[in-house]
Image (spheres, helix red, strand yellow):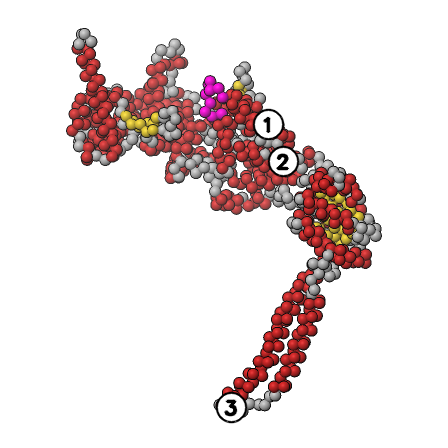
Amino acid sequence: MNRNGVVERSKSCDTLKPHMIRSGANMNFKSWLGERLRRTKQQESQPDNLSADVPIKSHPDDIFRRSQFVARITEVLLYSRAREGRVFAIRGDWGSGKTSLKNLIVEQLQKQSGKADWLEFNPWQWGSSEKIARALFSQMAAKLGGAHSSKAQSRARALRKYAAILSGVAQPLKDAKSDFSDWLVIAALVATSAGLALPQIAGAAVAPIFLVAIALIKVVVWVLNYLGRDQSNESLDAVRTDLEDRLAKSSRPLIVFVDDIDRLQPKEIRVLFRQIKANANLPNIIFVLLYQQSIVERALNPVAGKNGRAYLEKIVQANFDLPLVPQSKIYSFFTESLQAIIGDLATEANGFEQVRWGNVFIGGVQPYLRNLRDAKRLLSSLSVLVPLYRGKSAFEVNIIDLCALETLRLFEQETYASLPLRKSLLLQSHRFTGDRRDTLDKAEMQSLIERSRADDRQAVKDILKELFPRAAWTIEGPHYGEEWLADWTKAKRVCSPRMFDRYFELQVSETTVSESDFAEFVASSANASDLREVVANLQARGILDDLAVRMDGSVESLPIENIAVLLPEIFDIGEKLSREADSVFDSGFLHAWRAASWYLNRLRDLKTRGHIFIGAMRATDSLAVAATLISIELEARKKREGANSESQRIGEISDADLEAAKSLWVEKFTHRLATLGRDVLLKDKNLVSFLYRWAEFSGDESSARQWISTATDTDSGLAKLIVRFMSVGSSHAMGDKVSRRTENFDRAGIEKFFDLTVLNTRMQKLDITKLDDQERRAASILQKSLRSWLSDYSDDLTSSSDPDR
């Protein structure tokens, strides 16, 4: 930090190792799924017990070694024999592992088979108070058997249904009795008319048969209805009496575990405890209640004279409080499990730094890991999130920032949701000296922090200061300047304007070169053919301009040993972008030539730099980037002419190499003019810029003028060329929501290659009906400009010839 309190950029970097974490993409679903399948082996090595709400089932999963405590509780339950029941409680805060402890006790009971029966009852799934009470006794009856058990109720329902079917059969048989005689008479008449003889059956013999069948069915129906009578609607007292009889006859106790009591509504908690209190004296029954004490006490206060604790003491004979788990064990569990999730991602390439991880973990993550469930919640979330950012060749974000942001998202949802809406504040973009925003920014940051829980605001501050260093000054942190942005982008940190959005969109934008794309680009830079293939792919995706932006911001990442291959490709990229842009000053081309310039400047030897530059020019037909670099060097030399020392007058390349570069550029451009047709040349957006460079580098404007004269000897040629001379820009007035397109001509530029009077005459004779829309518009604007320029010229002549003026 300097004397002004601004953190200065350091060039040094810690040497990091993946194991240190123990101590301290354009990714859509299809590509994510493919990546996950490709990494099956790594997935299998990850822990599979990270689900926050899935308690452990058996002793091998018990990382906190509670076996002795479990054994003691099991012993107490098995030998608490009494004619009246007992009520025990296992108490602990939410997420402290009550259900896991219960599962371990059940495991112990299973190993001691025959000593007790047990039942696991969860009232949370039953809903209403009445259903909870009835479900409790129904499940107890099911465990003991008898008329009120669930199996018995199912059998009863089946018998009643069968009885109903048979009841429906009896009445048709009664009706059939009278109809059968009528059918016999009709059949006899038909047979007689046909000359047939039927056996003689007396009607009186038919009736007894039907009567016997009806009687038998009714008897069966009565028996089925009796056996299948519905006992589910009987009073709870009747159910209790039946249970009491069966429990008294049982040779072993029934242990009823009642879990998740603290998740019930207060009214439901009161109903449940009322039933347990009323039935706690049932013989051979042991209730084991699992809950958070404070929640149950508050629920019981209304029926206990504001003293829910005293009410509980009258019901529960003994309490088992979960052993306190040392926070250090929770932290160790988290870091070890996190290592299994991120694996080889804890590297310098993915922004992992030992000191920074320690700051984020201790100051921002640890305060939220209050229990094992909190740790598992965060780990589970990260295990889903991390694969989303695994690209083909690189991880797309900073692993430390990802962990910190996910901590906020999980535990401070309101604060997290506000972050993407406060991008300008967090990145300190759009700030300028004297904008008087300091007080406003401090207030906005304070408002953001106050969205978090009061007890955790210091942790939120620590996370925000680490994630967004440029805004750290608003919360008593240091100031960071823009010179850090390149380092932050290289480290893929969320405080980089380039990286910010991908952290909240959970993918890399389709208009952005991903880290994987850039890694592949860099890796291919040793071979010209491979490099061209990668660039062609990026161009097909429409993100060549973003590649130029990325190269400009990550020049240090470009392999200097591959400069002979990569620099000509940067020239080609710049050429493509310059032809797509409205102006050579557009962003994509600007970043391309800047990247080429910075890349060359990494070569410290002047002679080597000149040799590589000229070699790159020879290796490609692209001219735009080379022309810009030569022009910049010429302009810089003009400014250095008055320098006092020889060292200040030395340019980026030697005088000889500069002259050679100018000559080579002119040679290549004139070759292009000679080999390409006029119509092709007139469509090139770079044409006018190249004509200027031709005149500048050759020191002779006459050749450029002669070519223009030949190219514009027809009205069509003239119309097409003036389109290339027209400058396109934009303007924005106060109050405007969008900018306006501006089109104009530069007088100095036109006068450099045209005689204004001759050009004006040509333009007046131009048949605009034969022009396309763009040519017609350019012609109209130029005609107005010429009239204005020539009028000014005439006024100047009049002024100079009149001595009285």
SS for tag 2? helix
- Which image quadrant is residue 326 in? top right
Q: Which residue is mark 3?
A: 192
Mark 2, Cα crowd under 10 Å, few <14 / some 14-19 / many 20+, is many
In this rendering, is residue 106 above or below 545?
Answer: below
Which numbered circle lies on residue 462?
Answer: 1
Please tell me whether residue 204 belongs to the stretch shown in magenta.
Answer: no
Of residue 249 and residue 171, the one placed in the foreground of this image is 171
Residue drawn at (48%, 45%) of the image: 30
| Dot placed on the residue nearer the N-terminal end, 3 or 1 | 3
| Visible residue check, residue 173 | yes
Residue drawn at (52%, 21%) of the image: 439
Of residue 566 and residue 138, the one placed in the foreground of this image is 138
Q: CA distance from mark 1 to mark 2?
A: 19 Å
Q: Amino acid at mark 2?
A: Thr
Would you say the magenta stretch is mainly helix, strand or loop?
Answer: loop
SS for tag 1? helix
